[in-house]
Amino acid sequence: MTVLALAATLLAFALLGLSTDAHHGRRFGRRQTPERKRRMRLAGWISLAIALVPAVASRGWVFGPVLWLGLLMLSAGVVFLFLNFAPAAREPAGSGRHRRERLSR
Amino acid sequence: MRLLAALPLSYAVASVWAMALARVLPGALAEATVAATLIAFVICAVAAMYAYAARSGWRAVWVLSTAGMAAALIAWLSIAAGSRL
Amino acid sequence: MSRSFRQSQAGLHTWSGLLLGWVLFLVFVTGTVAFWREGMNRWMRPELARVEQPMQVLAGAQRFLQGKAPDAKSWFIPIATESSPGAQVFWQPQPKEGEAPRRRGRRDTQALIGADGLPALVRETRGGEFFYRFHFDLHYMPVIWARWLVGFAAMMMLVAILSGIVTHKKIFRDFFTFRRKKGQRSWLDGHNATAVLALPFHLMITYTGLVTLMALLMPWAVVANYTDETKLFETLFPQAEAVERSGKPAPLVDLRTLVRDAETRLGGTVGSISVSEPGDASARVTMYRAPSSMLSSRPPSLAYDGVSGRLLWQSPVHGAASLTAGTMIGLHAGRYADTLLRWIYFLCGTAGSLMVASGMVMWTVKRREKLPDPEDPHFGFRVVERLNVATIAGFPLGMGCMLWANRLLPVGMADRAEWEIHTLFLAWLAAFAVSLLRRPAASWVALLGATGLLLGLLPLYNMIATDKGLVAALALGDLLFVGVDLTLLVFGAAFLLVARRVARFRTEPRREGRARGKRIAAPAVLEPAE
């Protein structure tokens, strides 16, 4: 159940992150249509909301929301690091080391 | 000026509001006391933000002092009256 | 309105952050480590075996205390868990005539009961407790001052977070954006990312941090309602009535049976036990529910007759406001968190430390470009720049040295636990000296690099010198030691990478011009803080 919630939040942030113009261009190699952007956004938010269900189901109403928020931050961090540090098709990889690397454990 | 308003004054305002709220909040005595304290921290932060947002430093001092006085009045009346509202 | 409001908040954000950023950094770093308080307690005593049967430890603790302090005023026994080193028991001797009651936790009235139920003879160390206490008590200064300082810093932090949100409304829109190798933009993006990614955590931890200190910081509501504040504490933290020693000896009930009974009644595991007047007919046993089993930090408790084992008293249910406060403190301390959530806490704390650190560095990065002569900055700038090096790079160095001291100081040394801590501060002092004597560019590299080496090499030393090295611990299935050592390796590598990056950066020509600096509104108010 926890894994399910984590998967849903990861998916959500991946969608939200890729729906930004910069990352969409970098990852897919072309500009996105406004229509597609809106749909990805919506799907992302829905996925976020859905993640609350397995979180509450596994931990109950007291700890479930806490877990949900925690997973939210965790997957936002993972997606952030992935989008910004994983090599993309159109960019030379792995040269920009930065303080933030300390987070990437 | 703003720093003066932001630091000691916002804390003072939060403190008197803590006193006033502790007197007027409904519920058991201990409950009202704890709730007033919890709210006071928010008041303190908002007051500090206001001190910087106000049009001038003097205005910040003036408004915050008035807010503090109002709370002090409530607290004083309630203590003078002797019973909780 | 909204634009100028945002600008005004930018000034507030800058100055509230700068004023206490260094204290905040220390508080954040030690608080982050303190999420592993129990784990560090164990990791810093590598010779101890892992606790597998907590009840065996409890029985051993009772046996030990019956032999050592049979007529004490009270005993305090925590229940050992798999992550704790054992049970750190305290006892309080009967107060003598004309002598003030002794504080709990003096060294001659406490002992560590190990996994086998016998008092453990191990290296003397404060373990993870040091990081926990330092987080709000600091060190070498009166506790009350320290708490006011930390509380003040927390208030500033709350203001900084709120004003930061207002200032940078855009952070939510571009929060996936990170522009690499763009000088000031990169710092700003990094600062934003660490702030926004863990924003729920930052808000929660700062506000609840204030709540943990509320009795000290905001006593005014209490003053308004109570003439005697002990009355309030009696309501908030109810206790069974104190007992008088009758003088008639009577054997104490087996605590293990009471634990089993209490766990069914409390609906969760028991975390600690206190016994008043053990060995007397009036003995009283109080069982507290473990904070690891509930969100609120105000655990319900049960009081039993210490001889017959009969239930005498049950703590009443908390009211809503008290429960809220208890829950906030529980959220802050994260004692309820299982391993996954504990890691999330730890990562968020790390993000918070980076947020504070990057904010402090950004202050200098932003201003350097506007200096009339960047080679010869004014005094205030130099102070901030060097204090940044000394704190952000120096304190982790001290922590690294402390962990080494924990491994290297001779076991029989007098005041060994204190010297571990002195090592931290001596190393920090040395780092401070380095940052004063050398140019910041050089001392950043030297201190960060040294920290990286210290942290990275420690797991290797553990592998050679202790029997809980990475490989051995993995073979034993002792994941706590594996986890700490791997974390040290990762952090060591990260420090080295950052050091290398800083070293390279300084040799590159500065690319960003003044134009870029202008895009961020200059803080409106400079005078009052100078």
Image (tube, coloured by chain):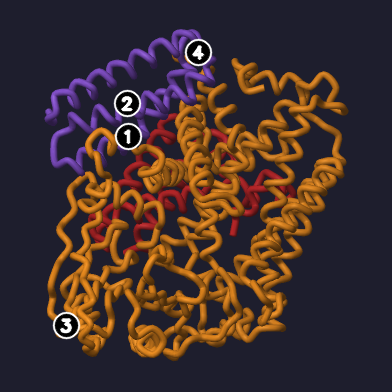
- In the image, the chain rendered in orange is C
Chain identifier of the residue bearing label 4 in the image: C
The answer to whether residue A63 is seen in the rendering is: no
Check disc 1 and report its element: helix, strand or loop. helix
Q: Residue at x 58, y 50 (%)?
A: C141
Of the residues tagged 4 and 3, which is closer to the observer?
3
Circles 4 and 3 in contact, beta carbons < 8 Å: no
Out of C65 and C359, give the one closest to the viewer.
C65
| Residue neighbourhood size for the residue with mark 2, other residues' Cα within 10 Å, grouped as few (<14), some (14–19), many (≥20) | many
Q: Quadrant of the C terminus of chain C?
A: top right
Q: Colour of chain A?
A: red
Left-right relation of A23 to B23? right
Structural distance between the alpha carbons of marks 3 and 1: 42 Å
Q: Which mark is residue C4?
A: 4
Structural distance between the alpha carbons of marks 2 and 1: 7 Å
Amino acid on which the number 1 mark rests in the picture? Trp
Amino acid on which the number 2 mark rests in the picture? Val
Of the residues tagged 1 and 4, which is closer to the observer?
1
Q: Which mark is residue C309?
A: 3
Q: Which mark is residue C220?
A: 1
